[in-house]
C-alpha cells in the first residue's frame, strides 16, 4: 500500500528498466507473499522444544487453548477494518514526508499525535464499555501491555519511524512492517507457548529475502542520486571556473 501511494504521490519512482527498480518491486512482492504464507499457511509442525513460558496461562481452558469469544459472523467487518487500517497507516507514512518538510521536529509532532490519539481512544472506550471495573489496572500482563504500548509504541517507535522516513523515505520504513510478523511469531513461541509450523519458516524466509531486495534497491538508488549530485556540482564548478578565467585580462 505504501509503495503504491508513494509512487502515486511522486515520492518513489517505479523505474522497472533499472536493476534497483526491479529489486524494489520484487522485494515488495516477496515481503507481502511471505507475510501471507506466514499468516495463513501452517503445514507440518516443527518441534524444537518449548520455552515453558505462557503469559496467557490464566486465560486458557482445560484443553490448553486460549479462550475465545470471537463472533465469526463479523469476519467480513474485520477484514474491511484491517484493510482500512493498512491504508490509513500507509497514508500516515506519506503524510509524514510532508510533515518533516514543514515541521521537522519528530518529538513534538509525535507528542501531539499521541495526545490526540489518547483523547480519541478515551471517547471511543467510553462509548464501548462503561464498566469502570474493567478500566482498573493491576500488577499483571494488562499493566505491562499498557505500559509497553505507551512507552515503546507511542514514545519511541513513532519517533524512530518519523526520523527514518525523513532520512530514507516512506518505502524504506514500511518495508520493515512484514518483519514484524516474523518477530511476533518468535515472541509468541517464546512467551505464549505457541507452535511453529513449516509455513512460518517459509514465510519468514520470503520476508527476509524481500527485505534484503528492497534495501539493496534503495541503496543503489541512493548511490545513483549521490553520484548525480556530485556530477552536477563538478560541472557547475567547472563552468563557473571557465567563466571566471574568460573574464580575466
Image (cartoon, rainbow, N blue to C red):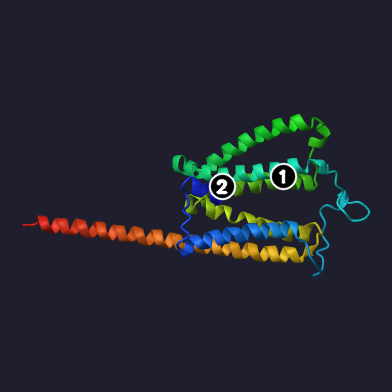
Q: What residue do we see at 76% from left, 44% from top?
A: 143
Which residue is tagged 1? 79
The percent position of residue 195, horizontal first and vertical second, equals 80, 62
The residue nearer to you, when weighing 133 against 130, is: 130
| Labels 1 and 2: the sequence-earlier one | 1
The residue nearer to you, when weighing 86 against 176, is: 86
- The answer to whether 46 appears left or right of 241 in the picture is right
**Residue 220 visible to the viewer:** yes
Which residue is tagged 2? 159
In the drawing, what numbered circle is on residue 12? Answer: none
**Residue 183 visible to the viewer:** no
Depicted 143 relative to depicted 31: above or below: above
Question: Which callout, 1 or 2, points to the residue nearer the camera?
Answer: 1
The percent position of residue 70, horizontal first and vertical second, equals 83, 44
Q: Quadrant of residue 116?
A: top right
- The answer to whether 73 appears left or right of 107 in the picture is right
| Element type where label 2 sits in the image | helix
Q: Quadrant of residue 27?
A: bottom right
Amino acid at each position: 500500500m505504501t509503495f503504491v501511494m508513494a509512487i502515486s504521490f511522486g515520492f518513489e519512482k517505479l523505474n522497472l528498466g533499472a536493476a534497483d527498480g526491479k529489486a524494489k518491486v520484487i522485494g515488495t512482492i516477496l515481503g507481502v507473499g511471505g507475510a501471507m504464507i506466514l499468516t495463513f499457511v501452517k503445514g507440518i509442525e516443527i518441534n524444537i522444544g518449548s520455552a515453558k513460558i505462557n503469559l496467557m496461562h490464566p486465560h486458557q481452558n482445560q484443553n490448553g487453548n486460549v479462550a475465545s469469544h470471537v463472533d465469526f459472523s463479523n469476519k467480513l467487518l474485520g477484514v474491511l477494518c484491517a484493510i482500512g487500517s493498512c491504508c490509513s497507516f500507509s497514508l500516515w507514512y506519506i503524510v509524514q514526508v510532508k510533515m518533516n518538510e514543514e515541521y521537522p521536529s519528530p518529538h513534538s509532532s509525535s507528542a501531539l499525535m499521541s495526545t490526540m490519539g489518547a483523547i480519541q481512544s478515551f471517547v471511543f472506550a467510553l462509548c464501548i464499555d462503561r464498566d469502570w471495573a474493567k478500566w482498573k489496572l493491576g500488577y499483571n500482563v494488562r499493566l505491562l501491555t499498557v505500559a509497553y504500548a505507551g512507552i515503546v509504541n507511542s514514545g519511541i517507535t513513532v519517533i524512530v519511524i518519523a526520523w527514518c522516513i525523513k532520512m530514507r523515505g516512506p518505502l524504506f520504513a514500511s518495508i520493515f512492517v512484514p518483519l514484524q510478523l516474523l518477530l511476533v511469531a518468535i515472541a509468541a513461541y517464546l512467551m505464549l507457548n505457541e507452535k511453529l509450523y513449516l509455513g512460518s519458516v517459509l514465510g519468514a524466509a520470503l520476508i527476509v529475502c524481500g527485505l534484503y531486495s528492497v534495501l539493496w534497491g534503495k541503496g543503489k538508488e541512493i548511490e545513483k542520486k549521490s553520484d548525480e549530485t556530485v556530477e552536477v556540482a563538478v560541472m557547475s564548478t567547472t563552468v563557473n571556473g571557465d567563466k571566471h578565467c574568460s573574464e580575466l585580462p
